[in-house]
Image (spheres, grey):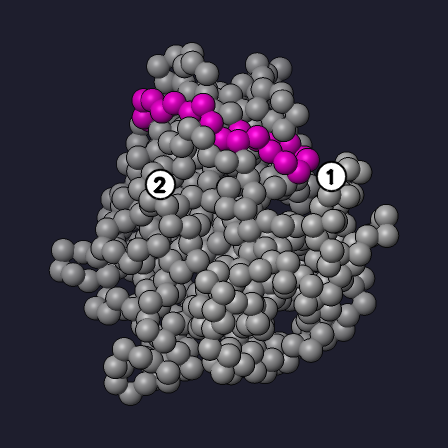
């Protein structure tokens, strides 16, 4: 599609309340926007300038094929802290719709979608964006793609792609596993305010050779971004009490962490160091896709889930190590004392009954939904190829062993996250200023193969784990300022993580009385987002928002 003006661009992307979306495409980048100066030395510098925007126009095509013309105001690369370590990453963009399909809209009280583009705990930046959805990935210093992340180049902006595939298995993720811009564009077309924060990430190195993006930098930065938005109530458009975060993979993990840890004092020192605004960092709701979180227990959860599955080479991982980690998971799961979701019929979830719980609560319903949507002939063909499924005309049933065989190869070796040779991306995430990669579990350190002296985790690791784990704020120190609304999604074929990670998160949130919408996409892999329109509708529902028009 052609430009309509020098500061306008057209974007075609899937939108709607039904599963299945159109591809991102037809994107043309153009002139930038004014930058608000928010990088002074004191809190007075953190004042949003309502007039420092550029007006842009984009076209959004929904899943039913209807085009929507959206005119919006765009604020570019606002530094959200007064003492930035690196403003390239510690800045955010704001997009506010002012006209949709020729009708003026008032977004002054609209929900705010806080959409991060974090992938693999790598740095993300909005500095080069020319419009909504333009955050880019990557950063200096090395580190490379994280374990389990797609291996494509990390330098391209998500919006620069002319032919990204439709959301599906890896089809809605950027090069390091973070989300592309689907949710942002859908939200804009729905009349919501979109805030896209950049954040520091692992691998960033300064001129002195020190790493400055390792844990807990990413969550500290995202909290600072929230504080900036909330401190500008009445100046920045949107309802600052209705902020909804969104992220995928590691971005999903920090999205859940942001929701779980609102206003927790354990971050105060870190926020003060970078000059975060004096405001709340609590958010209203969480959207998380395939969140890779609870990292100190992720190795055990992964082996419980995928321990008997071979690698893509056909080789089995070390089963002695796998069994050790499965035992660790069983012990951890028992201590959690989580109950199955209401209506599931399951009481306490343990390593012994979790397979049956996943089957009945998630996997079989997911397969049933998928099969029911197929034509009779397509369903017959699918079932003929997948004989592990029993279909009675209304419902799919199968065994856990059959499901594991259907998924096939596991993505990661053992241990999946705290690698004995320190090669995993998560080892890099828990590095220090002077050490690129470190162990963060006692088991990983004890079995280190790099020559680690002492064979134990360093003394600061326990605190870092608490800073990075949403379960700490939901189980060990239950946070009264947490989000009370949770949208969680995962593909059934996602072997980048364990299915119990998101299921534990969902169970704990609901056990605490929170509202949870959690399901698995059948036959989808890491980064899938096949119902983005439903997410946008869910935001309106939980926030109580009705789009305001101007006569």
Q: Disc 2 to disc 1, how far (Cα)? A: 39 Å
Identity of the residue drawn at 36% across and 37% down? 157
- On the rendered structure, is 498 left or right of 32? right
Q: Looking at the magenta stretch, what is its main secondary structure?
A: loop
Q: Is residue 110 depicted above or below 86 in this figure? A: above
- Residue 426 is situated, as x and y percent measured from the top left of the image, at 38, 65
Q: Residues within 10 Å of mark 2 (few under 14, many from 20)?
A: many
Per the image, the residue denoted by label 2 is 136
**Residue depicted at x 13% and y 60%:** 208
Of badges 2 and 1, nearer the viewer stands 1
Name the image quarter holding residue 21: top right
Q: Which residue is mark 1?
A: 378
Magenta range is 13-33
Picture layout, residue 383 above or below residue 337 = above
Question: Which part of the image, by quadrant, shows the C terminus?
Answer: top right
Q: Check disc 1: other Cα within 10 Å, few if <14, some if 14-19, many if 20+.
A: few
- Magenta stretch encompasses residue 27: yes
Q: Position of residue 268 (x, y in %)?
A: 39, 63
Mark 1 lies on a secondary structure that is helix
């Amino acid at each position: 599609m052609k430009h309509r003006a020098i500061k306008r661009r057209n974007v075609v992307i899937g939108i709607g309340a039904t599963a299945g979306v159109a591809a991102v495409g037809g994107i043309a980048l153009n002139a930038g926007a004014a930058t608000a100066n928010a990088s002074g030395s004191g809190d007075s510098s953190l004042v949003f300038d309502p007039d420092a925007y550029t007006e842009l126009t984009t076209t959004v095509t929904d899943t039913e094929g209807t085009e929507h013309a959206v005119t919006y105001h765009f604020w570019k690369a606002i530094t959200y802290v007064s003492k930035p370590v690196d403003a390239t990453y510690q800045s955010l963009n704001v997009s506010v719709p002012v006209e949709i399909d020729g009708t003026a809209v008032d977004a002054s009280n609209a929900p705010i979608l806080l959409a991060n583009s974090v992938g693999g705990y790598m740095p993300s930046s909005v500095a080069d964006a020319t419009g909504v959805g333009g955050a880019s990935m990557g950063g200096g210093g090395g580190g490379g793609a994280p374990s389990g992340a797609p291996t494509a180049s990390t330098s391209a902006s998500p919006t620069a792609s002319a032919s990204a595939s439709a959301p599906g298995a890896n089809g809605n993720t950027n090069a390091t596993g973070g989300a592309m811009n689907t949710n942002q564009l859908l939200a804009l077309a729905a009349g919501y305010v979109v805030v896209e924060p950049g954040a520091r990430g692992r691998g960033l190195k300064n001129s002195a050779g020190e790493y400055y993006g390792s844990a807990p930098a990413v969550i500290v930065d995202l909290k600072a971004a929230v504080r900036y938005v909330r401190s500008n109530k009445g100046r920045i458009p949107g309802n600052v009490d209705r902020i909804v975060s969104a992220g995928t993979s590691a971005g999903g993990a920090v999205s859940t962490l942001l929701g779980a840890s609102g206003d927790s004092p354990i971050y105060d020192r870190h926020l003060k160091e970078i000059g975060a605004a004096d405001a709340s960092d609590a958010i209203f709701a969480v959207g998380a896709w395939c969140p890779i979180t609870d990292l100190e227990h992720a190795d055990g959860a992964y082996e419980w889930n995928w321990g008997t599955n071979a690698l893509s080479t056909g080789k089995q991982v070390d089963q002695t190590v796998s069994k050790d980690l499965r035992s660790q998971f069983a012990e951890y799961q028992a201590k959690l004392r989580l109950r199955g979701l209401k209506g599931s019929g399951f009481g306490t979830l343990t390593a012994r009954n979790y397979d049956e719980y996943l089957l009945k609560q998630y996997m079989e319903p997911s397969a049933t939904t998928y099969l029911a949507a197929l034509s009779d002939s397509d369903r017959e063909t699918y079932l003929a190829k997948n004989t592990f499924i029993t279909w009675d005309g209304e419902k799919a049933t199968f065994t856990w062993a059959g499901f594991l065989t259907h998924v096939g190869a596991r993505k990661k070796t053992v241990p999946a996250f705290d690698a004995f040779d320190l090669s995993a991306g998560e080892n890099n995430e828990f590095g220090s200023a002077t050490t690129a990669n470190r162990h963060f579990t006692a088991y990983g350190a004890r079995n280190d193969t790099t020559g680690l002296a002492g064979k134990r985790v360093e003394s600061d690791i326990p605190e870092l784990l608490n800073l990075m784990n949403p379960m700490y704020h939901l189980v060990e120190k239950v946070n009264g300022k947490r989000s009370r609304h949770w949208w969680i999604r995962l593909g059934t074929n996602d072997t980048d993580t364990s299915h119990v990670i998101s299921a534990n998160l969902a169970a704990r949130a609901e056990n605490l009385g929170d509202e949870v919408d959690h399901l698995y996409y059948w036959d989808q892999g890491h980064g899938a987002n096949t119902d983005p329109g439903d997410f946008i509708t869910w935001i309106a529902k939980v926030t109580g928002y009705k789009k305001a028009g101007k006569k």
